[in-house]
Amino acid sequence: MDAFIVSLQAVWSDSGFTAFTSGNAIMIAVGVILLYLAFAKGFEPLLLSPIAFGCILANFPKTGFETDPGLMQLISFGISHEVFPPLIFLGVGAMTDFGPLIARPSTLLLGAAAQVGVFVALMGAMALGFNVQEAASIGIIGGADGPTAIYLTMKLAPHLLGAIAVAAYSYMSLVPLIQPPIMKLLTTKKEREIVMDQLRPVSKFEKLAFPVVTTIIISLLLPPIASLMGMLMLGNLFRESGVTARLAETSENALINIVTIFLATGTGLTMKAENFLNIQTIMIIGLGLIAFAAGTAGGVLFGKLMNYFSGGKINPLIGSAGVSAVPMAARVSQVVGQQANPGNYLLMHAMGPNVAGVIGTAVAAGTMLAMLK
């Protein structure tokens, strides 16, 4: 009997209950709320659900995730050694049509305008006492590009990876909730109703030349982001070549789905109570929201400017897609446009600035790396 009691005591002492804290309980509750938003509200469930479950897993004490070799260590390695972000970019390139950007190159300016959020948050972070490397990593949240945020943070401020990755991916997931109020506030109903002219056809040569030329120019100009830009454009070449259908299909389906599971779960695993429940993390989350809102506003306001100079032919709503969340932001432009005018189809028009936003955020990250590292 004594041996049985000793065994029970040993099981209890080794259990997570003995080290479970109120902070763990709070973070598990956060994970459950995120799961609710993903499954019940449909806020990007493919992205938010693994983040949420990773958060829950991270707050079970004594799991050994940080020390014992295994899957969780492999996931952490893939994040910390910049394996997953370029692979995500490969899949994004394979599933994205660059035609709208090629057909209307002026939308590149909308992608650039949306990067204002990056610099708003950067200046805000420095005002709050973060150093310039930390501020740059926080600022990139405004681009709404999780892989780029992870890539830059690991090079400039790896100790902030958890909070920045969670902020970037959470705001990407919540694009349908955050962007519409800003878009409606900054535009009139008449502007939202604008039906844009059909895009010109884009030749196969243009679709093949664009990723090659873009890779050469940006990689020579900003070598630190050659892996991101190279994988993005390689994926697009798989899509457009006409002779690599199997590679394109794998990149845009199986590969990106697998990497998304690992990257998003790994992001959730950084949400440990002892690292997350502090004033610094709260400031980063807040600055990230400001950055994302400012980026959305910057794109919409520049869209209004383009609308004025085009004689009313540009719907300002497509400017909100200048943030890098592909294709979520473009879908939001479509939804808000159709709410104002059921016959309005803005999706393909919004894909131009959306692709420009991916490129713009990567360029902003490369510029910061060149200046600060």
Image (cartoon, rainbow, N blue to C red):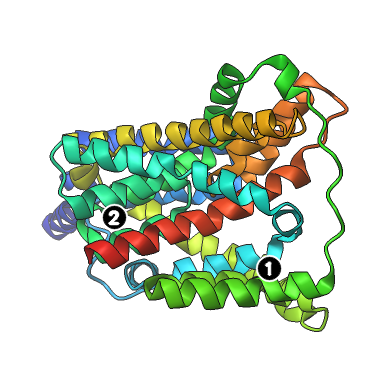
Residue at x 36% of width, y 61% of height = 367
Label 2: which secondary element? helix
* SS at mark 1 in the image: helix
Q: Amino acid at mark 1?
A: Ala
Image quarter hosting the N terminus: bottom left
CA gap between label 2 and label 1 equals: 27 Å
Q: Position of residue 44 (x, y in %)?
A: 59, 42
Label 2 close to label 1 by CB (< 8 Å): no
x then y, percent, for residue 68? 26, 72
Is 253 left or right of 197, judged from the image as shown? left
Q: Picture quarter containing residue 232?
A: bottom right
Dot 1, how many residues are within 10 Å of its Cα: few (below 14), some (14-19), or many (20+)? many
Percent across and percent down for residue 307 are: 68, 31
Residue on which the image places disc 2: 161
Nearer to us in this view, 98 or 246: 98
What quarter of the picture does the C terminus occupy? bottom left
Between residues 279 and 39, which one lies in front from this camera angle? 279
Q: Relative to 256, is 141 on the left or the right? A: left
24 or 116: nearer the eye? 116
Identify the residue at image location x=76%, y=80%: 246
Query: In the image shown, does 266 or 178 lie closer to the viewer?
Result: 178
The reply to whether residue 118 is visible in this rendering is: yes
Q: Which residue is mark 1?
A: 94
Q: Is residue 60 visible?
A: no
Residue 289 falls in image quadrant: top left
